[in-house]
Structures are given as structure tokens and as C-alpha cells.
């Protein structure tokens, strides 16, 4: 990324087939570029720079200085998603919400992805998964299947940040240790006589303790997609980050890539919240005691680095009776999630059908 930080127009590369000169797109099946005309395959050169982490503060400082390049994106007025298009894609609807209220914009883009999980699930497999899923939506309106346009199933790379950091924390805790005492008490027995009994009672002794805690965090994953897609995408997580490879424009060709909606600085503050939670439970575990209440905590971060990742999903948004429904597939693992409209006529008929069968059964039993 530092080498990407020049104020220049970003040219999206078009890949040409070596045999016929036709356009070649990324093919999930072969993990190579495939010519759309003669189907010949071109391997994508694999490099392994995965160990490269980018320094957080230096990058943010460069960003502040305004050294940025511009990228052509489509902005959706309805849900706010911003999609980077490759030269083969012309957007006439938003893949996230199906809205056609989209406009082309040139935005300043600083940070380009460094790693990507290339699509594993092909378009055909995605369509197949959608059909299977739809078949199980018994109460979905029958019209939906015909209405739904399969060409609206889009492959999109979703933006994420990952952060690494070293942490050193100083804490003050209130520690409670349980101990048990035997108490005597009086009670009235069944004959109305007063008796003396004993019982064990738990008590807690408190003391204040201070200490230090260190933890190194590796690859704290933060979603950088726009607000409305976050919950949706979470349903098909996790992604296996072992499948990450160095980013190459080749992997994007034929697909869309969402531009990050959560900036690097906001991503970092989300990551620190996650680290803070981990540090707190780490301290609670480290301190000896039955109850550990953290009263003061101060954490210093060092060696903060980040990476910008793209992870693949297949997404279909369809509108039915003025409502948007979504169907989503993890483009790496094939995990499926979605919502479908419910046909109340079908629900009513089914309910009536069950009631009728129950009625027949009742009549039959009565006649025995
Ligand atoms: Zn060709
Ligand atoms: Zn949208």
C-alpha cells in the first residue's frame, strides 16, 4: 500500500487472452483467468507476501496529507453501498438492495487491498444453491421463482480490516475471595419447640490489587462493509483466513468489489474495543480470586499494523411487493443464508388442510 499512495487516476486493468485477445475473467473453478471466447486458461502468478503488515499510524498520516488516488465507484442512494467496478461490469442496480437509484462517482481511495480470498464457489454452483434454498421455502409465493432474476446473483468481494498490536496494560482490581463460616440459628420444629441448628454461609473478603498484563493480538478481523450489509454478511461467516493470498487485480475481474465504508481509523477503534474486551477477560483470568472487578485499566498499544482484505460472497437482492429480500452465499465455504417473503394464502391453505385432516381423523375415531 505505501507504494499505492500516489495522487493519480487508478486504471483498472483489462486482462486479454493470450490466444485470441478476448477478455479473460477470474474463474473460481480453475483459480485462473479464463477467456470468455476460447475458454483458454491463464495462470495467475502467485506471490507470497502475506507476512507484510502495513504500519497503521504512518498510513493514517499519509492519508491526512491527502495523498490519494481516485477510483470510479457506484454509490447507492438507497442503502449507501459503494461498489468498485471492473471494466466488464456496468451497474444498473445495487447488488445489496436491488435499488436502481445508483450514481457513478469518483471517490478518493487510499488503501488498496493487500490480501484476498478468491472465489471458490462458481456462479453455476451459486445458482444451484439458490434453487435448493428456494425449494425449501415452502411458504414462499410460487410466483417468486419465476419472478426472481438469476442474473441478479452477483459475486462481490467484501472489505475487511485486520489489525495486529502489542499491548501492555496496567490495572487495578477489586478482588473478592469467598470463605465459609458456620453459623448457628434457631428454628421451630414440628412440635412447636425451639431448636438450634447450624449452617454453612458463604462470605466474601475484599482487597485491592494492582498489576500488569501483556498480550499480543494477531489478525483482529473488522468488517468494513456498509451498515446495512453487516448483519447479513455475519450470517455466512466465518471465512477461513488460511485461504488468503496476495491481492491481484486478476481475482476481481468479472466480479464487483465493495469499497470500504468503515475507514481505517474507525476500523482501528472497533479493533481496540475488541482487544479491550479480550484484555479484561485476560486480567480476570490472571488474577487469583473468586470475583475480579476491574476498577482501573490503562492500555498502551505498540507495533500497530493492519491489512486490508477482500472476502467473497454471492449476493442476490430481490424486491417483492415493495420489500427487499436478500439471499447470500459465502463465496469460499458455500454457507447459505437468506430471507424470503411468505405467501399468507399458502399458510392459510396449509392450516386449513391440517385442520381438515384433523377433523377427518376425529370423525373416523368417533365412528369406531
Ligand atoms: Zn481466448
Ligand atoms: Zn443499495
Image (cartoon, rainbow, N blue to C red):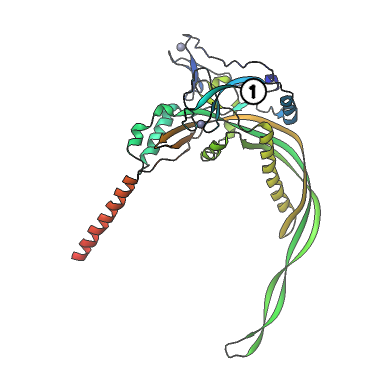
Q: Quadrant of the C terminus?
A: bottom left
Q: Quadrant of residue 222?
A: top right
> What residue lies at 81% left-to-right and 53% top-to-bottom?
210
Closest to the observer: 53 or 5? 5
> What residue lies at 76% left-to-right and 59% top-to-bottom?
175
Q: What kind of element bears circle 1?
A: strand
Closest to the observer: 131 or 151? 151
Q: Quadrant of residue 223?
A: top right
Q: Quadrant of the N terminus?
A: top right
Measured from the top left, where is residue 64 in percent x and y?
A: 73, 26
Closest to the observer: 258 or 41? 258
Q: Left or right? Give the position of 317 relative to 179.
A: left
> What residue lies at 60% left-to-right and 87% top-to-bottom?
189
The residue beneath circle 1 is 108
Q: Left or right? Give the position of 13 relative to 3.
A: left
Measured from the top left, where is residue 248 in percent x and y?
A: 59, 21
> What residue lies at 22% left-to-right and 64% top-to-bottom?
365
Measured from the top left, where is residue 232 in percent x and y?
A: 51, 39
Measured from the top left, where is residue 295 in percent x and y?
A: 76, 54
Crowding at label 1, few (<14), some or many (≥20) Cα neighbours within 10 Å? Answer: some
Closest to the observer: 81 or 247? 81
184 w.r.t. 123: above or below: below
Q: Is residue 368 visible?
A: no
Furthest-top residue in view? 20
236 w.r.t. 285: above or below: above
335 w.r.t. 74: above or below: below
Q: Left or right? Give the position of 83 relative to 70.
A: left
Q: Quadrant of residue 122?
A: top left
Q: Is residue 293 visible?
A: yes
Number of numbered discs visible in the structure rendering:
1
Q: Left or right? Give the position of 365 relative to 273.
A: left
Amino acid at each position: 500500500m505505501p507504494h499505492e499512495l500516489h495522487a493519480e487516476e487508478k486504471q483498472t486493468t483489462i486482462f486479454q487472452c493470450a490466444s485470441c485477445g478476448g477478455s479473460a475473467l477470474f474463474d473460481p473453478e480453475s483459480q485462473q483467468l479464463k477467456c470468455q471466447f476460447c475458454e483458454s486458461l491463464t495462470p495467475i502468478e502467485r506471490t507470497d507476501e502475506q507476512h507484510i503488515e502495513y504500519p497503521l499510524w504512518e498510513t493514517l498520516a499519509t492519508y491526512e496529507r491527502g495523498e490519494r488516488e481516485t477510483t470510479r465507484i457506484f454509490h447507492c442512494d438507497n442503502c449507501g453501498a459503494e461498489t468498485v467496478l471492473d471494466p466488464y461490469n456496468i451497474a444498473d442496480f445495487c447488488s445489496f438492495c436491488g435499488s436502481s437509484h445508483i450514481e457513478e462517482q469518483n471517490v478518493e481511495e487510499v488503501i488498496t487491498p493487500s490480501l484476498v480470498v478468491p472465489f471458490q464457489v462458481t456462479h453455476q454452483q451459486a445458482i444451484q444453491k439458490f434453487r435448493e434454498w428456494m425449494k425449501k421455502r415452502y411458504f414462499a409465493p410460487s410466483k417468486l421463482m419465476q419472478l426472481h432474476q438469476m442474473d441478479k446473483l452477483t459475486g462481490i468481494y467484501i472489505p475487511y480490516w485486520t489489525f495486529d498490536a502489542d499491548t501492555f496494560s496496567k490495572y487495578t482490581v477489586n478482588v473478592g475471595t469467598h470463605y465459609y463460616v458456620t453459623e448457628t440459628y434457631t428454628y421451630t420444629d414440628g412440635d412447636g419447640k425451639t431448636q438450634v441448628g447450624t449452617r454453612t454461609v458463604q462470605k466474601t473478603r475484599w482487597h485491592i490489587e494492582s498489576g500488569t498484563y501483556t498480550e499480543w493480538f494477531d489478525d483482529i478481523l473488522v468488517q468494513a462493509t456498509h451498515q446495512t450489509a453487516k448483519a447479513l454478511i455475519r450470517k455466512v461467516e466465518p471465512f477461513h483466513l488460511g485461504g488468503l493470498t496476495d491481492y491481484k487485480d486478476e481475482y476481481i475481474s468479472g466480479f464487483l468489489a465493495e469499497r470500504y465504508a468503515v475507514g481505517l481509523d474507525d476500523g482501528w477503534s472497533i479493533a481496540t474495543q475488541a482487544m479491550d474486551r479480550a484484555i479484561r477477560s485476560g486480567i480476570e483470568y490472571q488474577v487469583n480470586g473468586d470475583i475480579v472487578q476491574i476498577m482501573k485499566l490503562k492500555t498502551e498499544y505498540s507495533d500497530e499494523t493492519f491489512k486490508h482484505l477482500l472476502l467473497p460472497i454471492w449476493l442476490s437482492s430481490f424486491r417483492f411487493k415493495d420489500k427487499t429480500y436478500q439471499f447470500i452465499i459465502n463465496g469460499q465455504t458455500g454457507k447459505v443464508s437468506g430471507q424470503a417473503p411468505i405467501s399468507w394464502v399458502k399458510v392459510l391453505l396449509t392450516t386449513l388442510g391440517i385442520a381438515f385432516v384433523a377433523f377427518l381423523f376425529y370423525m373416523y375415531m368417533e365412528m369406531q
